[in-house]
Amino acid sequence: MKEVLIIYYTQTGQLLEILKQIASSIADENTNISYCELIPKEKFPFPWTQSEFYGAFPETFLQIPVPMEEIPFNIRQKKYDLIILGYTTWYLTPSIPVNSFLKSEQAKNLLANTPVVTVSASRNMWIMAQEKVKKLLVANKAKLVGNIALVDKNINHISVITIVHWLMGGKKTRMLGIFPKPGIAAADIIASSRFGKPIKTALHTANFDTLQKNLLSEGAVKINPSLIATDIRGNVVFTKWANHLIKKKGRERSKWLVFFKYYLLFAIWLIAPIVFIVFLLTYFPKYRKIKRDKAYYSSVALKQD
Ligand SMILES: Cc1cc2nc3c(=O)[nH]c(=O)nc-3n(C[C@H](O)[C@H](O)[C@H](O)COP(=O)(O)O)c2cc1C
């Protein structure tokens, strides 16, 4: 009997829907699939208010863990043949509950010497978050063998507008009846069941060496090279903001979070398009590097800093 654990944090259930689709084509009479939801002791809000949403930035980005509920004993005491880690990106970083789990003693015990497939469902900026997850998996002595990254395929600015409508309004509906639905398209969620097949083959042959290659041929990761530059640049600027904001307390912090909010709007609506234009202008001279970056960020390898 093969033992698979699906461990995840989702606020709206979108990520769980995807994980269930993937699991549906791994399941058979020789495979036992268990689910474990990561639960922070203090719940994060959904829908978010503006101040809660921006207020979560410094601790998220600085990867400061929060207290988590214990993983149930029946999950903790088992050794798994495969762990599927489902996470979402918050501020170019794994969400606080997932980061908190990955930094816990319980994660060390569960993940050590275990193959891991990561599944993310974000708006579209997940690349550097995945690099952070890769590092935390190494710290837990886990072996990353596969990655599936689902995104909202609408153009960047449309997805910004629609996700705000969703996260702050609480409903995954078409804004004003004219915008596309926020988040991962329903058809993409259903089609994610195809990723289970190569996972199942790897699981039953106990050979994960070609899993990522096989997942890539199913379209598990589609790198948008212009977003690599935006994500890297975003991380540089967020580092400065987060280190500044974390030192502010009380009313000072609230005041600075308002500045951060306006900076973020400015960055999304003005800086990101400029980064995109620079990307287009330098596309041909940088072609070989872009190709190398695409291959690296599609892979499960981790660069040494
Ligand atoms: C506080 C916060 C910050 C977010 N930041 C990002 C981000 O940097 N990049 C991104 O692609 N999506 C971002 N998202 C969207 C999430 O990755 C995710 O798609 C959405 O919250 C739905 O996830 P759920 O499965 O938990 O409901 C953010 C969401 C929240 C709540």
Image (spheres, grey):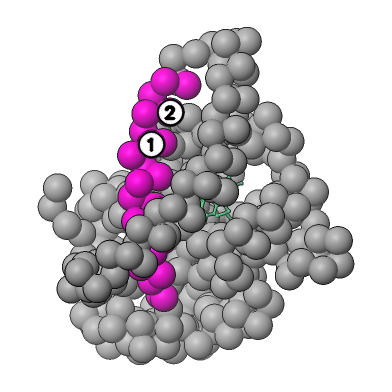
Splitting the image into 4 quarters, where does residue 266 fall? top right
Q: Is residue 57 left or right of residue 53?
A: left
The mark total stands at 2
Quarter of the image with the N terminus in it: bottom left
Q: Is residue 158 magenta?
A: no
Q: Is residue 190 above or below residue 169?
A: below
Residue 4, horizontal then vertical, whole percent: 43, 71
Residue 134, horizontal then vertical, whole percent: 29, 55
Q: Residues within 10 Å of mark 2 (few under 14, many from 20)?
A: some
Residue 209, horizontal then vertical, whole percent: 21, 80
Q: Is residue 226 left or right of residue 16?
A: left
Per the image, the residue denoted by label 2 is 241
Marker disc for residue 237: 1
Marker disc for residue 180: none
Q: Is residue 226 magenta?
A: yes
Q: Is residue 107 left or right of residue 59?
A: left
Camera-side residue of 209 and 150: 150
Splitting the image into 4 quarters, where does residue 250 fall? top right
Q: Residues within 10 Å of mark 1 (few under 14, many from 20)?
A: few
Farthest residue toward the right?
177
- Residue drawn at (20%, 69%) of the image: 285
Residue 283, horizontal then vertical, whole percent: 29, 69
Farthest residue toward the left?
304
Q: Amino acid at mark 1?
A: Val
Residue 224 in view, yes or no:
yes
- Residue drawn at (86%, 61%) of the image: 176
Disc 1 and disc 2 in contact, CB within 8 angstroms:
yes
Disc 2 element: helix
Q: Amino acid at mark 2?
A: Trp
| Magenta stretch bounds | 221-245
- Residue drawn at (61%, 16%) of the image: 255
